[in-house]
């Protein structure tokens, strides 16, 4: 065990003295994930200033304003009332006081009671705030659908014999009734996923995968320098040498990934629900990196081959695994391919953890998948090693 | 170039050797790199394995250090067989590779400590030995410097020092002076002489005849994988008693001239040598009396002679006599 630790400590010391290793595994992922966090800062803290012009002055129009001020939207929507459509238009064009405006026409409530012709609700948009406009449209369409349902119920009541004079009261009552929720989301996480909670580990993993190249090149460099022979001339078994080198790669990967995650949490506000599960994913990924490093060493014959091969492995994994694009938003083929990569599974786990899911439900399957991937790579490595020895 | 190749002439191996190799053979594909080599090194003895590049010295050493498995034959260190998995025996051996095998991005002290830790030395003993070795190789003042900041000679010394930290019983040095400046070379040879005096068994390979003469108690001459002769320098030189080495520097077709020389009755070996192939070396009986014939032959072969030197028999003469080729090819 002492020789294993000696080899691992020596390898780590060498890596820590290599500036490029610092930059690639510690500095670059922090820099890139930080930039991403800044770039997506607006979308992470989404808000909308919605103006309302109530030309109707009736209960149906008041209902729409109330929906906008409901507790569900209170954290996102700030409602500003305008007296005229012209004033609202100026405000929305400016974009400062209001980013989108809903204009409720005169006679809107009356139309619910069946008297008068139904008037359309207008949404005034600013092209610079498409998401806010989308939100206002969605809420308005939903409300108008409810109003139409109220109109239908009032019409039905009058047709059934209710006095026509009671239609406005019926309409007002119907307008205050809320439609029952048609869909109740089950099993979905409570928190929205922050961009940094996804791209922090994503970039961390991307750059930690580069340690495959560091490890493999380091092995061939030792072979070239003759130090590997020197170690073999000492009473050090192959197993101890392999363990020592694997241990250094493991610690290096774990330290790199851990540092990026801690910095993402402390400096950029990344959040994951379960620190133990986060640590388990980091350990799983580091084991996968160790196995991949061993595979590259066995397949490659020279330092240059090891460099090329490790680059291919890294880029194939990050492209398939969804480190550059949010996998859930990608096409189905990408989502399926991500399931063949350890980083794809790890990102799945981080996504669940980032949305509030804890423990095994978040990381159980990803950890099993990463373990299976690592076991397959290790088996192929051993097989190739044996073939090479007998060949 | 061909010449007379004599049967193996060996001195009896030293009894009770720290190192005992018997019938070592190793092939790489169709090529036999080491062919039935047997040698023995006693405690306090420095044994030189002398031969040109490609003679099989490094392959022999790799088998001695357990880096390569012998196809046939055995290697025993302190009576125990060595091999890639023989951990306990490997502790007795210190290996100095031909090229500098150190970590350039670690300091001098870190390199020594690392190689010492591989031999599971207790911390205190390791610290003590590292300090001793630093003094021995005269790098105490550079202990905290990175290896890549050292001169070539210093690196060579450290390369040897890294094999000494665990106080080996047998030190194996594979051409430790290749590419070294004269001053560092002198320092290395001084150290090697001292190791033997301190009771360490040393196996030293070289293709420099002067080094073998200077530091080795016994010399084994190896050529094309075979140990062709073995003994003290005096014993080996006695093999060519009454013979001289004639070195003739000339221009023209020296290869044809060397072949013509071999047809003369008293010429036993002839080979084209020199850094640029500008010399013909011959081993002859009574060089002084044969000199007019050699010069006459040079004239016939249209080889303009620039200088002639008759050298007293030495290991170079022995090698040329035994193998038909010069040592420094």
Image (spheres, coloured by chain):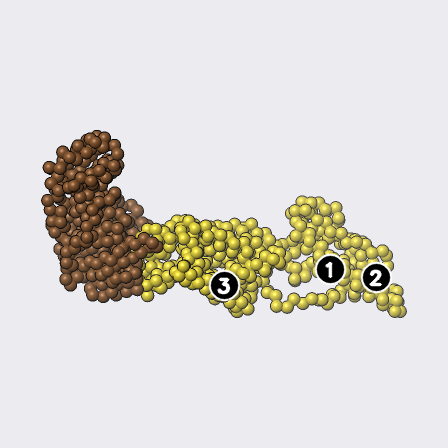
Q: Is residue A96 visible?
A: yes
Give me the residue at 43% from left, 52% from top.
A306
**Label 2 crowding class (10 Å Cα cut-off): few <14, some 14-19, many 20+?**
many
Mark 2 or mark 3: which comes first in sequence? 2
Label 1: which secondary element: helix
Give the percent coordinates (x, y) of residue B240. Answer: 13, 47
Foreground of the two, A371 or B127? A371
Q: CA distance from mark 1 to mark 3?
A: 47 Å
Label 2: which secondary element: loop
Location of the C terminus of chain A by quadrant is: bottom left
Foreground mark, 1 or 3, reads 3
- Tell me the residue that label 3 is attached to: A373
Q: Is residue B303 left or right of residue A22?
A: left
Label 3: which secondary element: helix
Foreground of the two, A152 or B268? B268
Give me the residue at 71% from left, 51% from top.
A101
Q: Is residue A287 visible?
A: no
Give the percent coordinates (x, y) of residue A322. Answer: 55, 56
Mark 1 or mark 2: which comes first in sequence? 2
Which chain is depicted yellow?
A: A
Foreground of the two, B321 or A383? B321
Circles 1 and 2 on the same subunit: yes
- Tell me the residue that label 2 is attached to: A113
Q: Is residue B289 left or right of residue B329?
A: left
Residue B244 location, quadrant: top left
Residue A142 marker:
1
């Amino acid at each position: 065990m002492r020789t294993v630790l000696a080899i691992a400590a020596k390898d780590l010391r060498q890596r820590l003295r290599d500036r490029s290793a610092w930059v690639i595994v510690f500095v670059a992922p922090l820099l890139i994930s930080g930039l991403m966090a800044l770039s997506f800062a607006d979308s992470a803290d989404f808000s909308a200033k919605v103006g309302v012009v109530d030309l109707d002055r009736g209960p149906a129009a008041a209902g729409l304003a109330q929906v906008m001020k409901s507790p569900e939207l209170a954290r996102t929507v700030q409602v500003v009332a305008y007296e005229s459509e012209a004033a609202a238009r100026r405000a929305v064009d400016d974009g400062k006081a209001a980013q989108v405006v809903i204009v409720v026409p005169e006679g809107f409530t009356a139309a619910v009671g069946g008297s008068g012709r139904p008037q359309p609700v207008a949404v005034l948009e600013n092209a610079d705030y498409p998401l806010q406009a989308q939100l206002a449209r969605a809420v308005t369409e939903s409300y108008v659908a409810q109003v139409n349902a109220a109109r239908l119920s009032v019409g039905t009541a009058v047709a059934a014999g209710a006095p026509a004079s009671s239609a406005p009261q019926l309409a007002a009552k119907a307008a205050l009734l809320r439609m029952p929720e048609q869909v109740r989301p089950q099993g979905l996480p409570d928190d929205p996923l922050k961009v940094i909670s996804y791209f922090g580990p994503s970039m961390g993993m991307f750059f930690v995968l580069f340690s495959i190249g560091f490890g493999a090149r380091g092995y061939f460099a030792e072979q070239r320098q003759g130090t590997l022979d020197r170690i073999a001339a000492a009473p050090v078994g192959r197993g101890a040498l392999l363990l020592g080198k694997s241990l250094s790669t493991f610690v290096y990967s774990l330290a790199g990934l851990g540092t990026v995650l801690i910095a993402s949490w402390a400096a950029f506000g990344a959040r994951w629900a379960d620190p133990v599960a986060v640590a388990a994913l980091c350990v799983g990924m580091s084991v996968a990196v160790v196995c991949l490093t061993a595979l590259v060493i066995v397949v490659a014959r020279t330092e240059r081959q090891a460099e090329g091969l490790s680059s291919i492995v890294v880029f194939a994994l990050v492209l398939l695994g969804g480190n550059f694009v949010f996998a859930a938003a990608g096409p189905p083929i990408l989502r399926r391919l991500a399931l063949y990569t350890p980083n794809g599974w790890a990102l799945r786990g981080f996504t669940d953890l980032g949305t509030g899911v804890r423990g095994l439900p978040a990381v159980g399957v990803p950890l099993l998948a990463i373990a299976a991937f690592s076991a397959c790579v290790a088996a192929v490595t051993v097989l190739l090693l044996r073939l090479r020895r007998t060949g | 170039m061909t010449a007379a190749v004599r049967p193996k002439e060996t001195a009896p191996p030293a009894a009770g050797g720290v190192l005992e190799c018997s019938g070592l053979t190793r092939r790489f594909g169709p090529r036999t790199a080491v062919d039935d080599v047997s040698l023995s090194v006693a405690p306090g003895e420095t044994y030189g394995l002398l031969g040109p590049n490609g003679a099989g010295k490094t392959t022999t050493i790799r088998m001695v250090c357990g880096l390569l498995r012998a196809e046939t034959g055995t290697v025993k260190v302190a009576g125990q067989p060595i091999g890639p998995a023989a951990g306990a025996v490997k502790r007795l051996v210190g290996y100095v590779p031909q090229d500098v095998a150190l970590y350039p991005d670690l300091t001098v002290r870190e390199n020594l400590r690392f190689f010492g830790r591989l031999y599971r030395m207790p911390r205190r003993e390791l610290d003590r030995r590292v300090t001793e070795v630093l003094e021995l190789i005269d790098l105490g003042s550079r202990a905290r410097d990175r290896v890549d900041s050292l001169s070539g000679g210093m690196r060579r010394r450290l390369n040897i020092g890294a094999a000494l930290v665990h106080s080996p019983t047998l030190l194996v040095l594979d051409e430790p002076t290749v590419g070294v400046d004269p001053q560092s070379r002198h320092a290395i040879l001084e150290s090697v002489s001292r190791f033997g005096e301190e009771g360490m068994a040393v196996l030293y390979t070289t293709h420099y005849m002067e080094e073998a003469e200077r530091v080795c108690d016994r010399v084994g001459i190896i050529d094309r994988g075979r140990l062709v002769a073995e003994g003290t320098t005096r014993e080996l030189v006695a093999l060519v008693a009454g013979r001289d080495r004639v070195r003739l520097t000339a221009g023209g077709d020296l290869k044809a001239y060397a072949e013509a020389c071999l047809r003369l009755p008293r010429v036993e070996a002839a080979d084209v040598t020199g850094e640029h192939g500008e010399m013909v070396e011959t081993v002859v009986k009574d060089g002084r009396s044969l000199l007019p014939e050699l010069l006459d032959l040079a004239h016939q072969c249209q080889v303009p002679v620039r200088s002639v030197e008759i050298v007293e028999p030495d290991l170079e003469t022995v090698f040329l006599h035994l193998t038909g080729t010069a040592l420094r090819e």
